[in-house]
Image (cartoon, rainbow, N blue to C red):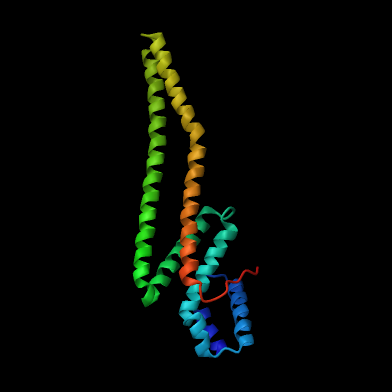
């Protein structure tokens, strides 16, 4: 029966606010009832209750991130993204047919993440190095100013220039970093939709 199937789905939808969860399930209840689907037909179309619940949760966290990516607090978004990634990985491994692909996807995710972190570390190490170099040059210039005025002024000017460059380029580097991160998140969302959301029409209401 539809009600029994959706009751099991509901039991596996922890993490979604109750009002949004109930609205989502009501949508599919009406859809299933209108189509007159039997339990076997529902399972064939949507998967087991646990699989369907996972699919709905993936869609929920993807859509929630799309709606709140710019305004959500960093801590909340990090929590949502972590849950989304975990659900995508578990969803891929839950299907025997997709296990080989899941392994490839996980390795790919880890590789992209490792490259991203290395690039990020390199960028910020460069910023710290340039800032430290600028301060060192400035202090060195002060130190030799009493001995050689021209050399002291040169080092002080070089130090100020390096420090100014860091101040100028830091917002740009941060913007590039955010853009790379958003590209990575978009890639993960594509994986979730491509392999876990192909059996139902996502809800776009609300």
**Which quarter of the figure has residue 94?**
bottom left
Q: Quadrant of the N terminus?
A: bottom right
Residue found at x 55% / y 91%: 38
Q: Is residue 114 left or right of residue 81?
A: left
> Where is residue 135, by image quadrant?
top left
Q: Quadrant of the C terminus?
A: bottom right
Q: Can the viewer see residue 185?
A: yes
Spot occupied by residue 58 in the image (x, y as percentages of width and height): 50, 68
Query: Is any atom of residue 14 visible in this view?
Result: no
The answer to whether residue 20 is above or below residue 74 is: below
Q: Position of residue 124 (x, y in %)?
A: 41, 40
> From what the image shows, is residue 61 above or below residue 38?
above
Q: Residue at x 54, y 83 (%)?
A: 6
The total of numbered circles placed on residues is 0
Q: Is residue 170 above or below residue 161?
A: below
**135 or 40, which is in the foreground?**
40
Left or right placement of residue 36 versus residue 94 in this view? right
| Residue 44 position within the rendered picture, expressed as x and y whole percent measured from the top left | 49, 84
Q: Residue at x 37, y 76 (%)?
A: 97
Q: Residue 55's x, y, as percent?
A: 50, 73
Above or below residue 30? Residue 164 is above
| Residue 165 located left or right of residue 114 | right
């Amino acid at each position: 029966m539809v009600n029994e199937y959706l009751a099991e789905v509901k039991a596996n939808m922890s993490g979604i606010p109750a009002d949004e969860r109930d609205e989502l399930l009501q949508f599919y209840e009406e859809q299933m009832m209108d189509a007159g689907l039997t339990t076997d037909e529902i399972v064939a179309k949507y998967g087991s209750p646990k699989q369907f619940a996972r699919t709905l949760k993936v869609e929920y966290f993807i859509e929630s991130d799309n709606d709140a990516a710019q305004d959500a607090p960093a801590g909340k978004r990090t929590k949502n993204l972590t849950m989304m990634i975990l659900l995508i990985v578990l969803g891929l491994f839950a299907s025997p047919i997709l296990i080989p692909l899941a392994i490839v996807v996980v390795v790919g995710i880890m590789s992209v993440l490792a490259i991203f972190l290395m690039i990020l570390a390199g960028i910020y190490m460069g910023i710290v190095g340039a800032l430290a170099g600028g301060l060192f040059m400035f202090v060195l210039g002060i130190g030799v100013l009493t001995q050689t005025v021209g050399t002291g002024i040169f080092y002080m000017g070089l130090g100020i220039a390096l420090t100014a460059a860091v101040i100028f380029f830091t917002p740009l580097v941060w913007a590039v970093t955010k853009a790379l991160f958003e590209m990575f998140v978009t890639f993960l969302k594509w994986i979730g939709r491509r392999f876990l959301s192909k059996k139902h029409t996502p809800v776009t209401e609300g």
